[in-house]
Image (tube, grey):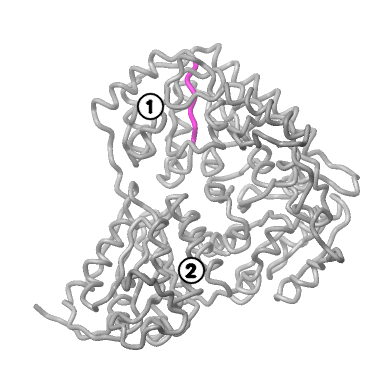
Amino acid sequence: MKTIRLTAAQATVRFLAQQMTEVDGKKVPLFGGVFAIFGHGNVAGLGEALYAARDNLPTYRSHNEQAMGLSAVAYAKASRRQRMMVCTSSIGPGATNMVTAAAVASVNRLPVLFLPGDIFANRRPDPVLQQVEDFGDGTISANDCFKPVSRYFDRITRPEQIVPALTRAISVLTDPAECGPVTLAFCQDVQAEAYDYPLSFFEERLHRPRRQGPDAHELKEAVAALRAAKKPFVICGGGVLYSDAEKELLAFCQKHAIPMTETQAGKSAIPADHELSLGAIGVTGTGAADKLAEEADVILAVGTRLADFTTGSWALFQNPARRFIGLNVQVFDAIKHSALPLVADARAGLAALDAALGDWKAPDVWRQSAVEAKAEWMKVAARYIAPTNLELPSDAQVLGALQRVGLATDIVVCAAGGLPGELHKHWQAGAPLGYHAEYGYSCMGYEIAGALGVKMAQPNREVIVSLGDGSYLMMNSEIATSVMLGLKLIIVVNDNRGFACINRLQRATGGESFNNLLRDTRHETLPTVDFVAHARSLGAEAVKVKSIDELETAFTKARKAKATQVIVIDTDPMAITDAGGAWWDVAVPEVSSRETVVAARDNYEKALAAQRVGD
């Protein structure tokens, strides 16, 4: 057996650079690069190894470890999970800063390889700087925080351990069912230790997406359920985009006359202008989609986790005879709420269903009800996004302006607050991947960092960031990274002076406005944040607009620019699209001295009666 003597860090980098994938028939590196913020846990070992490989496996410098992890998550999502990134940090706060990003990846089933530095395996200098000590367990370090949010976790305490660890890591990262974040906590002394590695370990490997077909018995049950359906309904989840199955889903629904709707992760897979495309579903759903969801008797859930925002906390689907079919690569998701499982890749599963159903179609009266419901909703929605001269426009009116001057190829990025709800209802994505929402973990601060990852994955498309002042203040450092890397973003900041979405939720559950809007917080002086000056200080070009007309003009100008653009507009913190949508289970206090809370609790208990869980 031929071997080569390398440090564990050098061997890791060499192995990662040899992993390839196939995208649109072309062989490309599996890893788009490495996000790295160096410290004493990784600068000597991995830093030296990455420097030597910088032409084959590029290293990107970020400004915040959580942000670079979020950029990596977005990169994987915008690449349909076919490509991914590595993130490495020092031990201590550098590592734990990435835990939130790992959680985002875990919830959204997205592949990211985290390589945080770790304490000394030999323990001679313990406790080292930034080491977290456990009084009862000498094996624990800060990196154990990654365990609950990693699909696979390992700690590298000997150089030869990277051989099985990396092999397992790649199998998880590229597996459609297991896919999620992998954490290899890399002890800093081990990174620098040498070992005679077999040359075969570094041979180029090509990874193609596995397309699992359905089990014959599960397929038979699913087909029988659909054939018996009078009101079938399809929910399109993110798995449709990950599987590159949007054409197959559209053809399936067209042929069999089944109305279709989208989750946050699935939005943009279905053409917005198709007559059977009812748009968003659930808590942030359109009136059309939620109306048909209430009546549906067989719901084919394709590539979705069926989270509470999709199901209206399981109070949305009111037909007593309803049945779910869970078409999903992961059994865990396919069997939720007593669904008939159809464990398969979305594209392969839809093809099998289509062939088995033959010429069967849903009743025409059901198809017609979908067409009419959509037409009615579009009239309602148009009122919310129409141009306005209001001094403080709503979020929906801002989005309407961006839509009017946008292009079909644009990608809009959002994550938290009220904007994902408004976007889910109103945004008309012009092409697949044109809507990028992180709403599985709803991570504030994802927006700008995530947009950077999207731009890295889709450099030829305009990437628009839609966020509020709260998310902007929480994480904005990657504006500087986008400027540094020449990756232009258009960032639109809706300044409502606080956490307006949660303020509205607080009021809806009987509470008083408290600690959300800046005016309702404990303060001596209310801050006047100059977002334009701040963005300019990070290297972006920025402007504040005073009206919807000015916003449209500024956006058109921003599209022509080459550098990252920031547009700020003041918005109304209370205005919201109150049409459409479904109930969401947010527990209201059972005991309170305040009448508004008592009333909200009474309404809450009445709503609970509509929940149908597990039947």
Give the residue at x 56% y 66%.
Answer: 67
In the rendered image, which quarter is residue 596 located in?
A: top right
Give the residue at x 71% y 76%.
Answer: 539
Amino acid tagged 2: Thr
Q: Is residue 162 above or below residue 384?
A: below
User: Residue 240: x percent and y percent?
Assistant: 44, 41
User: Residue 86: x percent and y percent?
Assistant: 42, 68
In the picture of the structure, the residue carrying the numbered disc 1 is 338
Tag 1's secondary structure?
helix
In the picture of the structure, the residue carrying the numbered disc 2 is 96
Q: Given this view, does label 1 or label 2 mark the residue nearer the observer?
A: 2
User: Residue 310: x percent and y percent?
Assistant: 54, 35
Q: Is residue 493 left or right of residue 346?
A: right
Q: Callout 1: 10 Å neighbours few (<14), some, many (20+)?
A: some
In the rendered image, which quarter is residue 188 located in?
A: bottom left
Residues shaded magenta: 231-236
Q: Nearer the viewer, residue 57 or 470?
A: 470
How far separated are the C-alphas under marks 1 and 2?
Answer: 37 Å
- The magenta stretch spans residue 329: no
User: Residue 175: x percent and y percent?
Assistant: 31, 52
